[in-house]
Amino acid sequence: MLLDLSGETLKPLRSKRITQYYSKLYYNTRIKAAFDAAWALENVKPDGAGKVSLIVVRNLVTEQAWEAEPESFRKWLIEQRDEEHKKNLAAFKQNLEESKRVPDSAESYHAYVIYIYKLICTDLSCS
């Protein structure tokens, strides 16, 4: 209902790049030590000596760690990511359909506002 009033349309969720998903799950156990070492080397370079940003180093180290993983693990993790994306997409579609429902009474409008508030606060960690 609110989206209809605003004229906005929500785009479906995109699947994360596999290295983003890998980093989300395994950063502390499989990436962090290598990143810390690479970042320390980058920080000893003098100014103007071709320093690169933290995110570039992190992405490079993550990519190297991903490539070093066994093929069977990589295949399994891709399947896990795709399955999670399907679940998230189904929830997105369900929430989108719920948001199109027009309240027909004061009580249902109140329930709708609470529903929208909970959706927003799930993403923003409202208290």
Image (cartoon, helix red, strand yellow):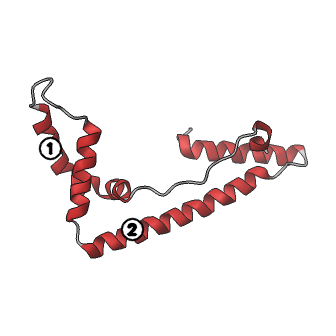
Q: Are marks 1 and 2 in contact (CB under 8 Å)?
A: no
Is residue 50 at least partly visible in the picture? yes
Q: Is residue 8 left or right of residue 87?
A: right
- Quadrant for residue 68, please give it: bottom left
Question: Disc 1 designates what residue?
Answer: 38
Which of 125 and 31 lies nearest the eye of the viewer?
A: 31
Which of 115 and 7 lies nearest the eye of the viewer?
A: 7
- Give me the residue at 17% from left, 39% from top: 39
Q: Is residue 120 left or right of residue 74?
A: right
Q: Quadrant of the C terminus?
A: top right
> Can you say whether 58 is above or below 83 in the image?
above
Q: Is residue 45 left or right of residue 93?
A: left
Element carrying mark 2: helix
Element carrying mark 1: helix
Q: Position of residue 30 (x, y in %)?
A: 22, 58
- Give me the residue at 12% from left, 44% from top: 37
- Residue 81 is labelled as none
Question: Disc 2 designates what residue?
Answer: 78
Q: Position of residue 91 (x, y in %)?
A: 62, 60
Q: Earlier in the sequence, mark 1 or mark 2?
A: 1
Assess disc 1: are there few (<14), some (14-19) or many (≥20) residues with their C-alpha within 10 Å of its C-alpha: some
Q: How many numbered badges does the structure rendering display?
A: 2
Q: Position of residue 46 (x, y in %)?
A: 9, 25
- Give me the residue at 34% from left, 73% from top: 75
Q: Position of residue 27 (x, y in %)?
A: 28, 53
Q: Residue furthest top?
A: 47
Assess disc 2: are there few (<14), some (14-19) or many (≥20) residues with their C-alpha within 10 Å of its C-alpha: some
Say which amino acid is labelled 1. Ala
Q: Is residue 89 left or right of residue 103?
A: left
- Give me the residue at 80% from left, 43% from top: 110
Say which amino acid is labelled 2. Ile
